[in-house]
Image (spheres, helix red, strand yellow):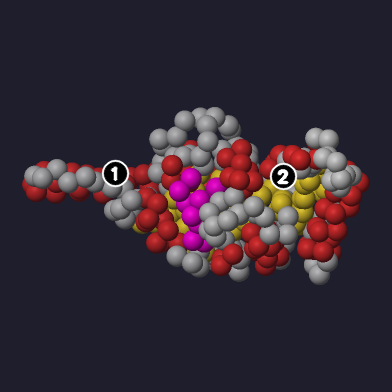
Amino acid sequence: MDQQNQQIVLGLDGSPGSEAALAWAIGLGGALGRIQPVIAWHYPWWSVSVPALGSPMPPSAEHLDQQARRLVDSMVADLDEALYLEPVVARSVASAAILEVASDGSIIAVGTHGRGGALRGLLGSVSHQVVNRATVPVAVVPQEAATIGLDSFVVGIDGSAQADEAAAWAIRHANAGADIHLVNAWTFEALGVPELEESVLARLEVQAQEVVGATLHRLRDMVDEAAFERVKVRSSTPRGDTREVLRSAAGDESILVVGARGRGGLAHTFLGSVATSLVHRPETVTIVVHSSKR
């Protein structure tokens, strides 16, 4: 596929989280475009007040800018120059700087937490803001998943437009021969009437399969036939909690892809409950695809 107009926008701050996101981007070898490093700085809160008698003066803007440049330069120093673009150093809030740089065709990659992160595996404040406010796909990369490539995808589908876009994104960007597993999970609360339950379960299973069929039909219209033929698309309709089903299906060897909001989501709002749960405690690289129409 032609990735000429794509880039991986990567917020760097020297934290293990940003190092994991960088390692993942490097491992893709340019498959999703060149890496666009972004580092942001702003005055600490205490620097805007008059220092107490005998206290040191706050750092200058020039000092903070140079410090940021040295940090980002050290993180990309060993990279092949063909893999990355000139780093962007911005005087800004980190999430705003990352979102400003990301444009159509980009994907943003973030770690699970930044320099302020205290709990491994939980989404940090910057990553949280980026995932919620982005208009392009965002990959959340846990440290233990930084080596996962583009050969296996699990995509959560539910008949919604955003789930369709998530599946289309995976098909377009997967490596040749990649496995694309479309998963439509469904649940059922016991009624206490065995005969009725059997009938309802059968109907729900049929409905889940119909959603898969309709999704595949729409994807044929959304994705170029050549891209569709490059990959192996399969589907399943397991019964269970959507979040746990998707985590189990992806394991630690597949990229998990979901739409920002599913059938229950409201337009122009934050992430849906499924996407929120998956990115806040990711067990693999988890990509949230936002609607191109929002």
Marks 2 and 1 close (CB-CB < 8 Å) = no
178 or 196: nearer the eye?
196
Q: What is the magenta range?
A: 276-288
Q: Which mark is residue 283?
A: none
The answer, for residue 230, to whether it is visible in the render is no
Mark 2 nearby-residue class (10 Å; few <14, some 14–19, many ≥20)? many
Q: Name which residue lies at 58% across and 32% down.
A: 294
| Residue lying farthest to the front in this orientation | 53
Classify residue 120 by image quadrant. Answer: bottom right
- Residue depicted at x 84% and y 46%: 55
Which amino acid type is shown beneath numbered disc 2? Answer: Ala
Q: Secondary structure at mark 2?
A: helix
Horizontally, residue 33 falls left or right of residue 234, namely right
In front of the other: 227 or 283: 283
Residue, x 67% and y 55% (percent of image)? 115
Q: Indicate which label's residue lies in the foreground, 2 or 1.
A: 2
Task: State the quadrant of the N terminus.
Answer: bottom right
**Towards the viewer: 135 or 212:** 135
Q: How many marks?
A: 2
Residue 94 numbered mark, or none:
2
Q: Which residue is mark 1?
A: 207
Q: Residues within 10 Å of mark 1 (few under 14, many from 20)?
A: some
Above or below: residue 291 compared with residue 167: above
